[in-house]
Image (cartoon, rainbow, N blue to C red):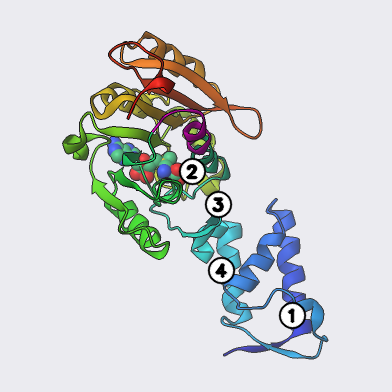
């Protein structure tokens, strides 16, 4: 195990932090790297004297090499350390999945609020389309312990990461993963789904080049690219969902700033949907759209009987 004095580590840290500032990267990332890859206990650098020795899991040149990838190639910190935090969990990530974003946590909160304010059952079949790392499926599984969760992705590599996260978080009995195109692997659930959530790819193709390099160069294109208007996947998911949702079932997606009005218009014009609404994220952006599978008798979605 490589051993260094506290002083040597602090010197390395200072230099790395200066390079972070020069590259407009938050300097705290150096500490994350030191702790997660170097095995340094967070408080030891301030509690120990400069001449005291610490064992590291990687040598300082190895850590420097890793940090250089962050600077030169703009590799996301989450790829270097292999995980990210999402809700109360540590989620494994790789270049095969979208790094879960904090705003996506709100989808689970919206489902929780909707359950409180409606007669939507907490049981039965629930679906996460485009599951990626599996976060939304896990969020639903925790919120709905008596429900069965079905999670779909077209990327086998993403499904492998989702499986690891699902197993790690102990939801493997409750969540089934499917490989395929949106609803296509779920034909056996037609007319039975209580609720669907999705965070589909929604960036317009032409806008991908202008994304920050961490996203553009390191996150999977299939998780980002929503076609020429960014709405291709949302449109597809919206059109096929009525065949799968129960009357009174919930349809909830995440989208990009500026896309909600178009999606609300499509939903309002579609005879199978009722009461579409946009929901703001924490920063006040219209980030989510919710709608209900219209009931055949036309009654409001919140009045349905189980
Ligand atoms: C924006 S990512 C969301 C991942 C995860 N749900 C999250 O919120 O972090 C979109 C996901 O949709 C998947 N995807 C793209 N096209 C798909 C398709 N035609 N059918 C199923 N999944 C698809 C991608 O592989 C990716 O994992």
Q: Looking at this view, is 76 or 89 the one in front?
A: 89
Q: Which residue is mark 2?
A: 216
- 81 to 303, vertically: above or below: below
Looking at the image, residue 89 lies above or below residue 132: below
User: Mark 4 = which residue?
Assistant: 66
Task: Name the residue rendered at 60%, 32% in the picture.
Answer: 281
Residue positioned 40% across, 59% down in the render: 165
Q: CA distance from mark 4 to mark 2?
A: 20 Å
The quadrant of the picture occupied by the N terminus is: bottom right
| Residues at circles 3 and 2 in contact by the CB criterion of under 8 Å | no
Looking at the rendered image, the disc whose residue lies closer to the viewer, 1 or 2, is: 1
Magenta stretch, main secondary structure class:
helix
The answer to whether mark 3 and mark 4 are in CB contact below 8 A is: no
Q: Secondary structure at mark 4?
A: helix
Q: Is residue 113 magenta?
A: yes
Image coords of residue 55 (percent x, y):
64, 88
Would you call the spot at circle 4 few (<14 residues within 10 Å), some (14-19), or many (20 or more)? some
**Residue at 36%, 55% in the rendered image:** 162
For the residue labelled by badge 1, is the local secondary structure a helix, a strand or a loop? helix
Which mark is nearer the camera, 3 or 4? 3
**SS assignment at label 2:** helix
Q: Residue at x 49, y 41 (%)?
A: 108
Q: Is residue 299 magenta?
A: no
Quadrant for ligand 1 reads: top left
Which of disc 1 and disc 3 is earlier in sequence?
A: 1
Q: Nearer the viewer, residue 305 or 261?
A: 305
- Residue 242 visible at all: yes
Instruction: Give the position of the C terminus as an image quadrant.
Output: top left
Q: Which mark is residue 44?
A: 1
């Amino acid at each position: 195990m490589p051993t260094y004095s506290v002083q040597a580590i602090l010197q390395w840290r200072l230099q790395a932090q200066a390079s972070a500032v020069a590259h407009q990267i938050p300097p705290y990332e150096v500490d994350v790297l030191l702790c997660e890859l170097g095995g340094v206990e967070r408080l030891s650098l301030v509690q120990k004297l400069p001449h005291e020795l610490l064992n590291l899991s990687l040598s300082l040149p190895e850590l420097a090499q890793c940090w250089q990838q962050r600077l030169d190639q703009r590799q996301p910190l989450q790829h270097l350390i292999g995980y990210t935090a999402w809700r109360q969990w540590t989620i494994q990530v790789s270049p095969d999945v979208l790094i879960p974003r904090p705003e996506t946590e709100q989808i689970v909160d919206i489902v929780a609020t909707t359950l409180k304010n409606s007669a939507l059952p907490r049981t039965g079949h629930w679906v996460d389309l485009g599951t990626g790392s599996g976060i939304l499926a896990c969020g639903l599984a925790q919120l709905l312990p008596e429900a069965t969760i079905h999670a779909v992705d077209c990327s086998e590599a993403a499904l492998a990461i989702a499986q690891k996260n699902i197993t790690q978080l102990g939801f493997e009995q409750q969540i089934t993963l499917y490989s395929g195109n949106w609803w296509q692997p779920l034909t056996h659930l037609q007319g039975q789904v209580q609720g669907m959530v999705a965070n589909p790819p929604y960036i317009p193709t032409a806008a991908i080049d202008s994304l920050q390099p961490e996203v553009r160069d390191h996150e999977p294109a299939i998780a980002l690219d929503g076609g020429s208007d960014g709405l291709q996947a949302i449109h597809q998911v919206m059109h096929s969902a009525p065949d799968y949702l129960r009357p009174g079932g919930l349809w909830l997606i995440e989208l990009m700033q500026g896309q909600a009005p178009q999606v609300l218009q499509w939903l309002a014009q579609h005879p199978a949907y009722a009461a579409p609404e946009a929901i703001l994220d924490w920063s006040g952006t219209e980030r989510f759209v919710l709608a209900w599978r219209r009931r055949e008798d036309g009654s409001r979605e919140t009045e349905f009987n189980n």
